[in-house]
Amino acid sequence: MAETPPRALTIAGSDSGGAAGLEADLRAMTACGVHGCVAVTAVTVQNSLGVSGVHLVPPDVVAAQVRTVVGDIGVGAAKTGMLATAEIISAVADVVDEVGIGRDTGVPFVVDPVAASMYGEPLLADDAMDAIRTRLFPRAALVTPNLDEVRLLCGITVRDRESAGKAADALHDLGARWALVKGGHLHGSPEVTDLLSDGERTWEFSGPRIDTPHVHGAGDALASATCAGLARGLEMPDAVAFAERYIRRAVAESYPLGAGTGPVSPFWTLADWDEP
Ligand SMILES: Nc1ncnc2c1ncn2[C@@H]1O[C@H](COP(=O)(O)OP(=O)(O)OP(=O)(O)O)[C@@H](O)[C@H]1O
Ligand SMILES: Cc1ncc(CO)c(N)n1
């Protein structure tokens, strides 16, 4: 019998196409050697072409999932994905306080402020980004917005390194301990650069832009791999470096699926990482 591995929790929506959402989260956690637990917030009707339906889970049921997982299994870190409504966000803020998940607890909280699918369908109610900003940012060890989410959160349009730095500072000022500004949407540059900051120091994670359209779930996988790194006991910059290494290979090995956009690949594991 093997030992119990590190555990992490994702509070997220389901993608029936299995590319993004909690399905992507669990796969990334598994690939990173971590047992993933789930608090489901919503069921989406989704495939490689888009989202055609959303069915919400009641906020008290979301909170009960968090409570019951943490009370029995215990987790070393947690993350959020699709939270859908201000009511679910409020329930999540209350329950993470109750169970000791948070910015300055021993169980780091990664907030991925998912606003829309990659096709542009909303995954968050219009009034709910404000709830993420006010209720979740002050509890977050790390926030991981893409450039559209940065604009919604702090009104900054990121075009280059300088504006990315300003955005990271603004996100930090909203209460997050660390901010990772993801540059995947800055098309036109041959490099993809993600900028991590704690308001004083910055780390840049750069690599060549990989020529693939199949990046469905890339953001979910990056936040989940970071959460897995934290659950494995890494400090923040190391956990992000670990996740950046994971996502670059996952993007390089992405594959087509259906008639639309395919996912980043989870079909390799930690055991492969040290291959030449
Ligand atoms: N073409 C690419 N080449 C290399 N890395 C990429 C590419 N696309 C995405 N990435 C990596 O994946 C990360 C997440 O992508 P992105 O910035 O698009 O986030 P996202 O919009 O939240 O993702 P999604 O909504 O598709 O799950 C990027 O920060 C980057 O590290
Ligand atoms: C359920 C769900 N969560 C997150 C995303 C964003 O990647 C998506 N497309 N679907």
Image (cartoon, grey):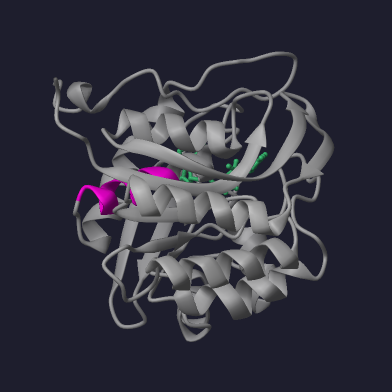
- Relative to 166, is 214 on the left or the right? right
Q: Position of residue 28 (x, y in %)?
A: 40, 34
Q: Say which residue appears at 35% left-offset and 47% top-offset.
A: 72
Quadrant in the picture for the C terminus: top left
Quadrant in the picture for the N terminus: top left
- Relative to 256, is 240 on the left or the right? left
Q: In this rendering, is residue 170 above or below 95?
A: below
The magenta segment is 224-232
Q: Is residue 225 magenta?
A: yes
Q: In this rendering, is residue 199 above or below 88?
A: below
Q: Is residue 35 magenta?
A: no
Q: Say which residue appears at 34% left-offset and 63% top-offset.
A: 108
User: Toward the viewer: 161 or 167?
Assistant: 167
Q: Outermost residue toward the right?
A: 52
Q: Position of residue 134 (x, y in %)?
A: 61, 80
Q: Which image quadrant for residue 259?
A: top right
Q: Position of residue 186 (x, y in %)?
A: 58, 52
